[in-house]
Image: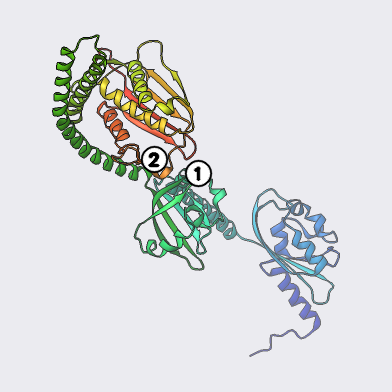
């Protein structure tokens, strides 16, 4: 095999020159100040400039356009610190023509400290890869936005946390339920959302097995509410996270309580109707004997007025009991037009008569329309229902206070609203949903807890509703909403 190695220094230099000129990589050799000493044929093709135009000039001046695009800071590190670099640039304008390119640029110091070598490579594949990455990035961003919109559209609260419990995301439903903006909750521990911060740790193990757990959560404004929680562990290649789903049970619990209340009231109505029927028999005797005694007693007799009071009271009780028996079993069977102003005035008179001591220290204000506030209903039952609400208000102010009564008829709204508000001790939140339950009372020796449940049933039988707004030490407002009568009076 013949020896192909160059025999002389001249041959060696010629070989190196051939390699320098024909290697498929652009090469520029600069001295320690940045002056261009050499440039090969491939670099001329890449830059589209003759080497004679750049040799002897400074690289940073001849290729000034690259520096203006802010991509050559590594070049200065090379000159100053002799620090090698490799840089991939995309969509840049070269110095000598106006067509964007993508390229790989490398720089390294020469071993004898005499200068540096710069290598450049331009390839269509780099440009295609760049466009592919951009397309992939666009598709990835679109998928991310779609997933985010999908999660935000969920009717359930969706929260993700780190393994430590620090919140990393909150969907739009979660913001509406908990009243937190996502940015306000990020980084906070998930226990922040529980009424008892220790509850999360107690239920997390069970919830992570896919079994929903009922928990007590708390909103940003301090309002507690019931919820059902499920949790999933998310396993990644290098990280772990948790996915939590919450369902607000407030409405469901309220419906359950109302259903339970309706069932209790149905039993109560039957019980009340039965008691009323039993009471009606002796009342007939009382009324009849009082009537006979009244007829046999001269009007100028001192006892005649007392006998008349007994007779009228017995007749009133008989009428009320008869009405209760009919309407508690068959609501709306004997309704007729009535003026709510007269009903409220009579109820206030009855309440004042029953709570004489409270009446002397409670200031009562009335805001009633000048014209009749007409509805269809049973005046006796409504009078008794409103009397019970007023008595409750008087009893809530043993030290005195203010009581306001408002009648607000609104034909366009289709209802008449009666608001009775006191400045008393208020109703604790725990008792607010129980005030209409039969036999529920927090007072001692002041009745059997049937007054407000009777009022609730009467209003319900009139196709209305009764709401209560209160807080401990903040007074109480009862709002009764009754349907406005149709124009034909039906």
Q: Residue at x 85, y 61 (%)?
A: 56
State the image coordinates of residue 124 (x, y, percent, origin top left). Answer: 59, 58
Res. 374 image quadrant: top left
Quadrant including the C terminus: top left
Residue sticking out furthest to the bottom: 1
- Distance of label 1 from label 2 (alpha carbons): 23 Å
State the image coordinates of residue 260 (x, y, percent, origin top left). Answer: 27, 43
Q: Residue at x 21, y 19 (%)?
A: 311
Count residues near mark 1 (Cα–Cα under 10 Å), then give few for <14, some for 14-19, many for 20+: some
Can residue 328 be seen here? Answer: yes
User: Which mark is in front, 1 or 2?
Assistant: 2
Res. 271 image quadrant: top left
In the picture of the structure, the residue carrying the numbered disc 2 is 432
On screen, residue 288 above or below 50 = above
Which label was assigned to residue 208?
none
Indicate left or right for 359 with 26 as reference: left
State the image coordinates of residue 117 (x, y, percent, origin top left). Answer: 76, 69
Q: Nearer the viewer, residue 20 or 303?
A: 303
Q: Nearer the viewer, residue 410 or 476?
A: 476
On screen, residue 318 above or below 240 = above
**Could you say whether the residue bearing mark 1 is in a helix, strand or loop?**
loop
Q: Residue at x 40, y 19 (%)?
A: 408
Indicate left or right for 405 with 315 as reference: right
Q: Nearer the viewer, residue 310 or 316?
A: 310
Q: Nearer the viewer, residue 415 or 79?
A: 415
Which label was assigned to residue 179?
1
Count residues near mark 2 (Cα–Cα under 10 Å), then give few for <14, some for 14-19, many for 20+: some
Q: How many marks?
A: 2
Quadrant including the N terminus: bottom right
């Amino acid at each position: 095999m013949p020896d192909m190695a160059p025999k002389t220094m001249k041959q060696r230099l010629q070989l190196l020159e051939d390699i320098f000129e024909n290697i498929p990589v652009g090469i520029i050799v600069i001295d320690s100040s940045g002056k261009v000493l050499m440039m090969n044929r491939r670099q001329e093709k890449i830059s589209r400039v003759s080497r004679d135009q750049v040799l002897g000039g400074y690289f940073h001046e001849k290729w000034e356009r690259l520096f203006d695009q802010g991509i050559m800071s590594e070049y200065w590190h090379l000159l100053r610190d002799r620090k090698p670099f490799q840089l991939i640039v995309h969509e840049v304008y070269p110095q000598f023509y106006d067509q964007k390119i993508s390229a790989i640029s490398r720089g390294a110091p020469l071993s004898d400290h005499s200068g540096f070598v710069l290598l450049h490579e331009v390839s269509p594949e780099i440009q295609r890869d760049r466009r592919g990455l951009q397309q992939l990035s666009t598709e990835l961003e679109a998928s991310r936005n779609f997933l985010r919109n999908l999660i935000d559209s969920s009717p359930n609260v969706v929260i993700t946390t780190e393994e430590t419990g620090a919140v990393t995301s909150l969907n739009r439903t979660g913001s509406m339920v908990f009243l937190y903006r996502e940015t306000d909750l990020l980084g906070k521990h998930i226990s922040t959302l529980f009424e008892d911060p220790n509850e999360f740790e107690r239920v997390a193990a069970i919830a992570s097995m896919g079994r929903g757990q009922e928990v007590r959560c708390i909103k940003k404004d301090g309002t507690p509410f019931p919820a059902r929680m499920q949790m999933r562990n998310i396993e990644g290649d290098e990280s772990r996270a948790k996915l939590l789903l919450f369902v607000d049970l407030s409405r469901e619990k309220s419906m359950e309580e109302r259903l339970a209340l309706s069932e209790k009231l149905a039993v109560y109505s039957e019980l009340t109707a039965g008691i009323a029927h039993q009471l009606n028999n002796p009342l007939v005797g009382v009324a009849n004997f009082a009537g006979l005694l009244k007829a046999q007693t001269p009007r100028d007799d001192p006892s005649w007025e007392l006998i008349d009071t007994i007779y009228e009271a017995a007749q009133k009780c008989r009428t009320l009991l008869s009405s209760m028996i009919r309407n508690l079993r068959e609501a709306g069977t004997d309704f007729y037009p009535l003026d709510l102003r007269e009903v409220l005035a009579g109820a206030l008179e009855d309440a004042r008569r029953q709570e004489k001591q409270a009446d002397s220290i409670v200031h009562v204000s009335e805001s009633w329309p000048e014209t009749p506030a007409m509805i269809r209903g049973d005046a006796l039952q409504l009078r008794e229902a409103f009397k019970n609400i007023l008595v409750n208000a008087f009893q809530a102010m043993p030290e005195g206070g203010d009581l306001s009564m408002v009648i607000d008829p609104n034909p366009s709204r289709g209802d008449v609203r009666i608001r009775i508000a006191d400045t008393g001790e208020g109703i604790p939140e725990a008792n607010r949903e129980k005030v209409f339950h039969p036999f529920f009372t927090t007072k001692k020796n002041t009745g059997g807890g049937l007054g407000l449940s009777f009022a609730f049933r009467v209003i319900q039988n009139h196709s209305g509703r009764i709401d209560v707004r209160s807080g401990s030490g903040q007074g109480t407002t009862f709002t009764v909403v009754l349907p406005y009568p149709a124009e034909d009076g039906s």
